[in-house]
């Protein structure tokens, strides 16, 4: 509600054009055409105005009320660019509003401008790009052929332009709507397949005129900050060194900044709370006190100690994204992605997997080629998510002490190495060694914004807590119930029976304690359940130096390393598997992913343990 007016804002997917090459482009243009919004607000990057004006050129062709939001004006100024907003508005003949979204500047003015445009009875006459003269007559002829034949709500001028542009979706629509006229249209299009060059050329000439009129550039020869930094950040060798160095810093920060807080939460809050509740329920039935102390407090309470680890991780990830580093990381990794038949764009969802595999799988939608997208989806679970890293961060110090940072770093490198090897194998044997091309925009560097990073951390932590608050409570109670039934004794419980049945497999990996095997199995529901299950099975009231120390005392370093390797490579959580099914629309590929990960994790765990035994 603004100025006593109810406003519905629809956030459409980000895109650079309105062709039918990707799902984002189709969703955006179909919504604008079919839903007919009162006004379209396009938010473009002022520091990359030339690149973003291409979308503006296509939006103006749709003949919809239009407002341009010129975001990141401050970043443009940092790079020596000065944009004359009034001049740009006069050149485009549409409202233009400068915005600095990260500082909440200009947003109200943007909405006010859009509202006035809706309420204004005066129609706009925007300055639209034109096709080059060589094909204007052809465009007019196509318009005459489809007159009265284009289904609503599509405009005939726009459809004619898209036909000449070779848009497959529009061509299919016209073929179905006008079967008699289609042979003549198709013959005409076949004779002018090069028309797309004049269409895009006309748009870029229009963009050049807008930029010449409204943008003042730094003097020639000026080396801006982005150029100086990119000499190192995008360097084939030093850029890679920097990338792995940043990963190492993330883990170092996790241990030195988060682990003291984790220890404090366990010793000052979780354990005392469990003791107090245990005393208060001394006269209650054993099953009830066990449910509360070991099931709820022991499971959920232990998982909540992950919060400091995740906060540190998401802060670092948010900073890297906000300053513009992640796209450079994609550029550096592009040549390695090609080993697997992928390109740098696939690196972005893979990197996102360090936060959570679920949005990473969904993020593969930015990969346009279906084969490349499917391969990227299959590789995402090999990226250790924040929950896996939290489990590893929790247990590694107990196994390896002061070498925990190095071991964690090597575990992540090991996962990424296996990811590459599996990607090469799948591409070579299943996809016959196919490759895809790669074009990506590199943003300018800018100072990170605390508000943006804070929102990023808050949203991710809120999602984690919702997941923990539902799944972890349920699984903790289930694990406790299976550890209690049928006789109220953990060692003779249903859970112990399942663990002992799998012990022969566990011994090959050095996991002689059935509780560790059960903890791996329950991680299928949520990776955090590894710790929650161990907290239930080991009993939080029995802590002597914490749960990690208890588990560390159970295993040799070789077995501990094997357990961590399996944990890093084990099948993903059920939410990730559900999203894989959703995005691939195939139970076959979903089952392939699960079986592949289960097989590799078992082989890797056995191999690491046996090799460690031989080396000792």
Image (cartoon, grey):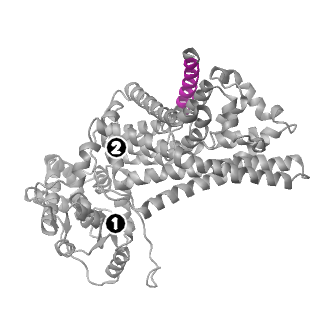
Left or right: 441, with 452 as reference point? left
Main SS, magenta region, reads helix
Asked whether 608 falls inside the magenta stretch, the response is yes
Q: Which residue is mark 2?
A: 329
Q: Position of residue 398 (x, y in %)?
A: 62, 35
Left or right: 176, with 50 as reference point? right
Any part of residue 353 in sight: no
Q: Position of residue 532 (x, y in %)?
A: 68, 43
Q: Write the residue at 20% across / 55% down.
A: 224
Q: Earlier in the sequence, mark 1 or mark 2?
A: 1
Q: Write the residue at 18% across / 58% down.
A: 142
- Camera-side residue of 521 and 543: 543
Indicate the quadrant where residue 597 lies: top right
Q: How many marks?
A: 2
- Camera-side residue of 60 and 73: 73
Q: Position of residue 364 (x, y in %)?
A: 42, 45
Q: CA distance from mark 1 to mark 2?
A: 42 Å
> Which residues, given as a range, are shown in magenta?
594-612
The numbered dot on residue 457 is none
Q: Position of residue 254 (x, y in %)?
A: 52, 45
The numbered dot on residue 153 is 1
Residue lying furthest left: 134
Q: Quadrant of the C terminus?
A: top right
Q: Secondary structure at mark 1?
A: loop
Asked whether 219 falls inside the magenta stretch, the response is no
């Amino acid at each position: 509600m603004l100025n006593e007016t109810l406003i519905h804002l629809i956030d459409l997917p980000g895109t650079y054009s309105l062709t039918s090459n990707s799902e984002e482009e189709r969703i955006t243009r179909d919504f604008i055409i079919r839903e007919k919004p009162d006004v379209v607000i396009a938010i473009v990057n002022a520091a990359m105005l030339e690149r973003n004006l291409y979308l503006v050129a296509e939006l103006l062709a749709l003949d919809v009320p239009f407002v341009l939001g010129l975001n990141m004006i401050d970043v443009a100024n940092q790079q020596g660019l000065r944009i004359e907003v009034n001049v740009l508005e006069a050149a485009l003949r549409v409202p233009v509003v400068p915005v600095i979204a990260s500082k909440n500047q200009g947003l109200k003015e943007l909405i006010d401008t859009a509202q006035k445009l809706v309420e204004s009875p005066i129609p706009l006459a925007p300055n639209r790009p034109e096709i080059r003269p060589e094909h204007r007559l052809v465009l007019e002829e196509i318009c005459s052929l489809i007159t009265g034949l284009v289904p609503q709500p599509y405009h005939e001028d726009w459809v004619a332009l898209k036909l000449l542009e070779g848009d497959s979706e529009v061509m299919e629509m016209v073929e179905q709507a006008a079967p008699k006229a289609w042979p003549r249209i198709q013959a005409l299009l076949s004779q002018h397949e090069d028309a797309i060059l004049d269409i895009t050329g006309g748009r870029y000439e229009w963009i050049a005129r807008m930029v010449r009129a409204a943008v003042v550039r730094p003097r020639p020869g000026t080396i801006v900050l982005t150029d100086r930094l990119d000499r190192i950040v995008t360097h084939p060798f030093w850029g890679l060194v920097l990338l792995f160095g940043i990963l190492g810093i993330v883990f170092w920060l996790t241990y030195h900044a988060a682990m003291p807080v984790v220890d404090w939460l366990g010793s000052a809050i979780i354990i005392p709370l469990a003791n107090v509740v245990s005393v208060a329920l001394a006269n209650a039935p054993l099953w009830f006190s066990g449910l509360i102390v070991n099931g709820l407090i022991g499971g959920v309470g232990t998982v909540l100690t992950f919060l400091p680890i995740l906060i540190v991780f998401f802060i670092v990830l948010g900073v890297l994204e906000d300053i513009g580093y992640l796209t450079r990381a994609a550029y550096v990794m592009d040549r390695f992605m090609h080993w697997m038949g992928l390109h740098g764009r696939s690196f972005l969802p893979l990197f996102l997997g360090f936060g959570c595999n679920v949005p990473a799988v969904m993020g593969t939608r930015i990969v346009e080629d279906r084969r490349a997208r499917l391969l990227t989806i299959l590789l995402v679970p090999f990226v250790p998510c924040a929950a896996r890293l939290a489990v590893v961060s929790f247990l590694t110090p107990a196994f390896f002490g002061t070498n925990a940072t190095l071991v964690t770093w090597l575990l992540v490198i090991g996962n990424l190495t296996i990811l590459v090897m599996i990607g090469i194998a799948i591409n070579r044997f299943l996809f016959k060694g196919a490759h895809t091309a790669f074009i990506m925009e590199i943003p300018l560097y800018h100072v990170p914004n605390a508000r943006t990073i804070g929102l990023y951390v808050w949203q991710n932590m809120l999602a984690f807590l919702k997941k923990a608050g539902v799944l972890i409570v349920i699984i903790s109670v289930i694990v406790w119930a299976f550890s209690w039934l049928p006789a109220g004794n953990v060692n003779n419980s249903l859970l112990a029976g399942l663990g002992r049945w799998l012990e022969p497999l566990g011994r090959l990996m050095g996991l002689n304690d059935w509780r560790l095997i059960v903890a791996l199995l329950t991680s299928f529901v949520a990776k955090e359940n590894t710790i929650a299950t161990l907290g239930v099975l080991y009993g939080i009231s029995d802590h002597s130096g914490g749960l990690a120390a208890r588990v560390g005392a159970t295993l040799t370093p070789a077995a501990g390393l094997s357990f961590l390797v399996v944990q890093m490579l084990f099948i993903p959580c059920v939410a990730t598997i559900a999203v894989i099914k959703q995005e691939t629309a195939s139970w076959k590929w979903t089952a392939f992913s699960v079986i592949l990960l289960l097989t590799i994790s078992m082989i890797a765990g056995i191999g690491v343990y046996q090799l460690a035994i031989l080396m000792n």
